[in-house]
Image (tube, helix red, strand yellow):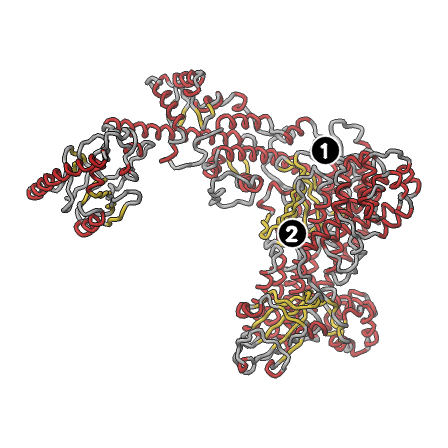
Amino acid sequence: METEAAAALAHAQCRRRWTLAEQEDMEEADNGETEHQHHLPTRRGWRWCWGWGISAPLPKPFRRCRTSRVRMTRLALYHPRGPESCARTLRTEWGKQVVVAAGEPGACSLRGESRKPLGAHTGSSSGGSTACLSVYSQTEHALCCHQPAGHASGAPFPCWAGQVSLFSIPGPSAASWHIPGQRPGLGQLKEELREVQNQRAQVENIQSQVQERRKEALSLQFQEWTLDVTGRIPLALVQGSFTSFFEIVPQLPLDGKPAYNMEKEVVYTMEQKLNEEEFVEYLYPLIRDFSTDVFQEFLHHLAQCADMFHETIRHDIRRRRFSDLFLECDPGKVGFLDRQRVLALMESFYDNMYSESEEWQLRNPRQWPVIDISEMDPEDFWANFQEVEQHTEEKDDDSRSLLLEPSEGNTQIKDLISNLMEGSPAEDNVDKETHFLEVKSLSDSASKLMEDIPHEDSSNKDPHIIQGQPFSETTSQLMESRLSEDNSDKVPHIEGEPWSETTTQLMQGRLPEDISDKAPHLIEGKPWSGELLTRDLAIRYSSYGDRSQDECSAAASQFTDLHPIITDIHSRGPSHVASAFNSSKLNLPQFVQLLETFLGDAAPLSVVDKLSTFIQKEYVETEEEKMLLISKVRQDAQMARQKLVVQALFEKWDNDGSGFLELSEVEAVLSKYKDGMESEVMDKGRETLSSSQSQRGVWKLSAYDFYKYIQSVVSKLPGPDSEVFENVVEFLTSSVERTQAEKTRGTSRRKWLQHIQAVAETSGGNLDPVYKALFQALYKDAEAHGSNKKISAHICLLEQSTVDEKCTEVLRCVACTSEDASYVLNRTLHRNMKNVSFAAIDQGIPVHVPRVQYHGNIHFWNIVRPEEERKGSLIVLPLIDAQQRVFGTLSIDTLRDTRERNIFLTHEMSFYQGITNMFSTAYHHIEMHKNILQLVSSALAWIYSRTPNIQVINTYLMEPCLDKTQGYVFRNMMRTDNKTGVSEIFSCPTTLRRRDNLFRDYLFKCADSSEVITTDAYGERHTAVPIRDLAGRAIGVLDLSTGQCWELPAHEHQDLQKMLQMLQEACNEILKQYNADLERGRIPDHTPVGVLFHHFMLQDLRQCVSKLDHQSFAELKSYKEPPSMVHSILKAVLLLFCPDWAESEEIHSWNHCKLKVNSDLVRKILSFNPTDQSVQINPEILAKYIKGIPRGAVWKHGSIPAEHLYNWAFTCMSLLELTRKMQNNEQPARLDQPAPN
């Protein structure tokens, strides 16, 4: 009741004042006043806004209450007819945009430009032009003006909800200026504004000091690098260190900001270098926005890179000496040395040096990784319980501290940066308008410090400078006194952390004495010359001893008709940067790498000199051996030349790129050689060909078959082989004449076919670019050589489908041209449907339908197409792999071509056969890489619980580099976390180039030499292991990181070797599937790739178990109470053959279990296959007994039977788990069937 009475009274008073105000406004308008003073009633509880005025008269019927004169940017007005009438009146008379303000009951907001000048200043540089006008009804205005007596003085009145007006003046207390019940004065507002400005200036000053300290930290870090004689470092190293930081530390708290913006040009050479000032100027803009934690991580990363670069220079000196040693041992420039002789010399040197050194030891040249796993005795892998001599690098104290901990200077920098940078206010680069709120305590403390500093003459100031201003001793004393006070609130803080003494020294411009006098690194007591001569050793010496270029030039000059084709073949040939492993010989990069592996990382330069002198003196070849080597090299060069010439001859005959030649056509031409005098010899050339090259009685020759056929014919003709070969090639070349149009067509088609293969080799395991390249080749050929036909095409792969519990073959469309995607893509074609595709599969030859409208057995995918438009030509070609198995079809039609004559010509069909051959090669190349990744994943799953010291394994596959001189690039295809055993295959693998990864050069050294490399990178131990093809050349690299574990325990080392051996054997089995000239090994066909590794491991373990006899088992039977570990192993083995024992008491009785240990148990193990459907054991039951046994405990127990049984049971359990997982994730299986002969 009291509230209503007060409101009524206020309303009556406002009505009276309204009348007076209206009269006054009319008088002011008559007097021509343009600037109106806005008045409000003075009542207890009333709060108004301070600001700048509005130069515009208020329209009627708006009126103002007059008691005090205040110029405002926001007015509280009332209207007798309510807010809506207010809005309409304002729009009509002022021409402004008026909206109802949210959260303001009964209010309207006036915003925008007035027709009349407003001049509403908002504190911006532009002068501002925005004004706000809030309009209230009469009752609301009366309640605002008259607060009831019972209302709390500090609480906001209900009608003020949402009416807090924020000025453009920044400050933390801007919102508090509008709390009802308070009335600040103008002086107080100015004081608050001055305080905010001081805080902002102090924050900017602190940020500037932090920036200077970061530059100081970078300057200190520069001294940790090994400088050249001019005191500089290569720019490429700085760029490599910066970019690698985001690879090594991927999880960075960047607050949604980009990691970096490398706008500067990337440098790949070592010639351009930076001094200290240029080093800071280059890096600081890139790291300016880093937070404190990220900046500290970056400094630590730079320190690691500096240490790695120091080691790189040391290794460069060693590699230079080993390179010179190779050249001295190869005076005839043959290009390789005898590997077994070099290993024998290393063994002799090792035996003599082993007893001379106690602090450092060589690696044993009789063990891995000095020798290859394939060269080891199989008995060395399992159950070798002697004290194994590890391949350790016993580093001296200085080298060990360099690897495990930062150097002395690095430690000082780390402590310095940790103290001065922790909690820097500049870390987040936040907006200055809000940042001062977070550092309020810092600003208060800093302002108190600055107030106590007396004004001094500049002559008394210390010369140390901060931000361009001298810093006086009095300032320093005052700061130190403030820092020493017990009251922590008065100590300057950066995000809650007090400044350290080192920070104070830096703010005064001083450096700790133990850092400022640090000298640069020296290499063996000498400064670095500034060159890395062996950085690209494999690239520099890739042509050393290689006579392919000379042979190519000689062949091209001799066979002038084949000159363009020979040049083209040589240009697109493989790079010679990566070397193939050979157990009998070493080229220069392999020789250098072998000696480095033998010495280890910590070998002093004196030992390098001793080893070099020893090998140079002892490596002696007799004259007879030298002549044999030279003869062998010449013979290999001649064979390579003949292959090149025959390849060019094949491409000239196969002008349309079909990929094969008709044997009958070749024999018909050769029968005329020497006027038919050698016809009988020509008939015997067919004997070297196998029946697998025949198709329905018509013999077809691939390029390899054609070479074998020519070699067979040449060997049977009388005369010297080289002379006969030249005569036969000249005769076959002159027998085929091509017009210029045919030559142009053949050149174009070879280019398109090679592009498909190149795309497959550089696609990162993705088939989509291959499909696109194939369809583009079809489009281009149809346009250029097919009378501009409009064609459509699709690719189908053979799959196994289950319908009504019956397995049937279907063709699933996996790719098609864009016009047919909605009708064909992902559709399946069954045998019982109208089609000719299965006829092409069954016959193994193309099926051509010139007129589809007359065939009657054609399946039209586009059922919407009218009958009269279903005209055109169709050709279906089978996709055949290297093993002559059909796995799909390629269909091409001209139904979109409206011309009457649109059939395919003979040369077009030949080109389409070449397309299918090239696609088959490209498809299986990608499938091979996928299978290798799956194989590696299963191998790493087997080892992850057995080698806990291995932390992360990255799998890299090699791809040809566009720049042939660089050889290849790496694609990071998979990352395996060995703590969980989970492998992640990347859909978009990153690319690693040699010139961009200076600190990961061990990966490229591994691929260059195809040998194992152990090294330290970024403070962790890495072992790079090559994955080789059948020729011994690396196709990928496994990068195993053991973290801070510099040497694996004996059992982990042995398990790793066995895993790598089985992995390479399983990989060879996969590669044989894609080679037409090699037969598959001991694994049955259609064995899933996911279990291939375990099958090889199981076979190897069966051989180990087969060697166990009664004497071996006597040890187990002798136990009355065996160790629980031995009993658990035997339980797991017996449960595989007696699954019904799982719930019985026999399994827990040792007396019952040991009765089963006999020759019959060995027989069962040799014939047991865990993947058979008859095996009913649950792998979880085996895991209960096997997985609880530590691998190291079995090794330490020292029992050969227990070791073999444990490994066999563990592999069986892993195979059961993997098989179950594959069944749960079963997908439609790809099929293939042999092509008919």
- Seen at 20% across and 51% down, the residue is 88
Farthest-out residue, front: 1
- The residue depicted at 62 percent of the width and 72 percent of the height is 891
- Circle 2 packing at 10 Å, graded few (<14), some (14-19), many (20+), is many
Looking at the picture, does residue 684 appear above or below residue 635? below
Judge from the rendering whether residue 901 lies leftward or rightward of residue 120; answer left or right: right
The CA span between labels 1 and 2 is: 29 Å
The vertical placement of 1229 against 299, above or below, is below
Mark 1 packing: few (<14 Cα in 10 Å), some, or many (20+)?
A: many
At a point 75% along the width and 36% down the height, the residue shown is 391
Q: Position of residue 1114 (x, y in %)?
A: 92, 38
Residue 200, numbered circle: none
Locate residue 161: give its quadrant: top left
Circle 2 residue: 958
For marks 1 and 2 on the same chain, the one whose residue lies earlier in the sequence: 1
* Image point (42%, 28%), residue name: 209
Q: Position of residue 58 (x, y in %)?
A: 15, 44
Residue in front for this viewpoint, 118 or 1032? 118
Q: Nearer the viewer, residue 1045 or 4?
A: 4
Mark 1 lies on a secondary structure that is loop
Amino acid tagged 2: Met
Secondary structure, mark 2, is strand
Residue matched to label 1: 393
Horizontal and vertical percent position of residue 524: 65, 30
Work out whether 257 lies above or below 217: below
Q: Which amino acid, mark 1?
A: Glu
* In the rendered image, the vertical position of residue 798 relative to residue 231, given as above or below: below
Image position of 996 (left or right of 469): right
**Dots 1, 2 in contact, CB < 8 A:** no
